[in-house]
Image (cartoon, helix red, strand yellow):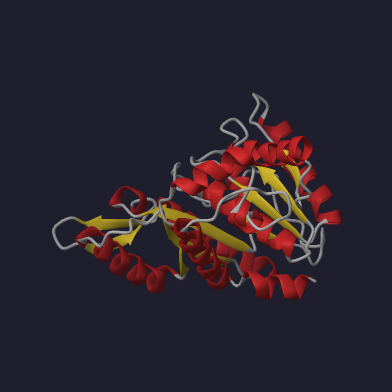
């Protein structure tokens, strides 16, 4: 990701005053961004907030399909579940048109919502770069592997120490610096160690130490992610989240795995301070 936003794309700080924008960002795919995004969205909806969502990875479209599955479940099964206002944006051959669509989507959603969540692609492209410009909170999930860690840091293989920030971390530093210079605002960057194995290992401990060290060096907060559980894939097909399992008409038999998953989710939401955000916007 380049440090600068695409030409012509700048956050309009007067547009949607009071709206909080959450960006799910990572240049590597397969880290669980869309699953976490959907759980954050539904949590905010249950807090009584109005939420708009933008899928900038509409070709892959995981968040879009999740929301479509949810709408279908409500229609076909008579469920009454809260839903966001959703806008998918798929890249076209015309870059300028795509950027105008993004700006229009965010402007429109900001007029009618308390929170706008932007899910970016697991790659570096102009739409993802533009989406990051709007972040008040940036959430970066990482799988527990050195391949994923390489997105934000270079690790010396001989010493197993941080050699320096990587390309994505450097770009986020520039984005935060530019934001501070323009309006004195800040970007709360939260890195999640996601899809953690439930078995202790040397690599798991090394990852924890490295991420903690890096957080102090480049200024992000760490939070626990979600474990590697089959339940998340099953819920996706139904358009449901862990927060919906007690809703009227949802017939999912609760197991100990569900209970453990809900505890993980509560820890994640607490670490992100989502309830405090909801109170501030209510």
Residue 213 occupies quadrant: bottom left
- Describe residue 147's horizontal placement relative to residue 97 as left or right: left
Q: Residue at x 29, y 62 (%)?
A: 207
Q: Position of residue 62 (x, y in %)?
A: 58, 38
- Describe residue 234's horizontal placement relative to residue 109 as left or right: left
Q: Residue at x 57, y 60 (%)?
A: 138
Residue 25 sits above or below residue 87 on the image:
below
Most extreme residue toward the top is 93
Q: Can see residue 120?
A: yes
- Describe residue 248's horizontal placement relative to residue 165 as left or right: right
Q: Position of residue 70 (x, y in %)?
A: 69, 42
Most extreme residue toward the right is 111
Of residue 134 and residue 139, the one placed in the foreground of this image is 139
Q: Can see residue 20?
A: no
Label total for image: 0
Of residue 73 and residue 162, the one placed in the foreground of this image is 73
Of residue 173 and residue 259, the one placed in the foreground of this image is 259
Q: Residue at x 66, y 55 (%)?
A: 244
Residue 89 sits above or below residue 178 on the image:
above
Name the image quarter holding the C terminus. Answer: bottom right
Q: Position of residue 119 (x, y in %)?
A: 61, 47
Q: Position of residue 198 (x, y in %)?
A: 33, 59
Residue 45 occupies quadrant: bottom right
């Amino acid at each position: 990701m380049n440090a600068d936003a695409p030409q012509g794309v700048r956050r309009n700080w007067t547009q949607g005053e009071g709206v909080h924008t959450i960006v799910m960002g990572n240049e590597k795919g397969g880290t669980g961004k869309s699953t976490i995004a959907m759980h954050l969205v539904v949590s905010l909806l249950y807090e009584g907030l109005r939420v708009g969502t933008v899928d900038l990875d509409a070709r892959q479209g995981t968040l879009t399909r999740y929301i479509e599955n949810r709408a279908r479940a409500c229609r076909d099964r008579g469920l009454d579940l809260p839903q966001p206002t959703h806008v998918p944006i798929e890249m076209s051959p015309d870059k300028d048109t795509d950027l105008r669509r993004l700006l229009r989507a965010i402007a429109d959603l900001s007029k009618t919502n308390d929170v706008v969540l932007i899910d970016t692609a697991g790659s570096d492209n102009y739409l993802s770069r533009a989406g990051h410009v709007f972040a008040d909170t940036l959430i970066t999930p990482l799988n527990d592997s050195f391949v994923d860690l390489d997105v934000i840091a270079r690790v010396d293989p001989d010493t197993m120490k941080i050699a320096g920030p990587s390309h994505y971390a450097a770009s986020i530093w520039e984005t935060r610096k530019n934001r501070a210079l323009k309006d004195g605002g800040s970007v709360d960057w939260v890195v999640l160690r996601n899809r953690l194995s439930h078995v202790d290992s040397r690599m798991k401990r090394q990852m924890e130490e490295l991420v903690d060290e890096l957080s102090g060096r480049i200024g992000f907060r760490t939070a626990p992610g979600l474990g590697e559980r089959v339940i998340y894939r099953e819920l996706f097909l139904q358009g449901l989240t862990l927060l919906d399992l007690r809703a009227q008409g949802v017939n999912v038999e609760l197991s100990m795995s569900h209970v453990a998953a809900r505890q993980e989710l509560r820890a994640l939401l607490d670490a992100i301070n989502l309830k405090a955000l909801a109170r501030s916007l209510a």
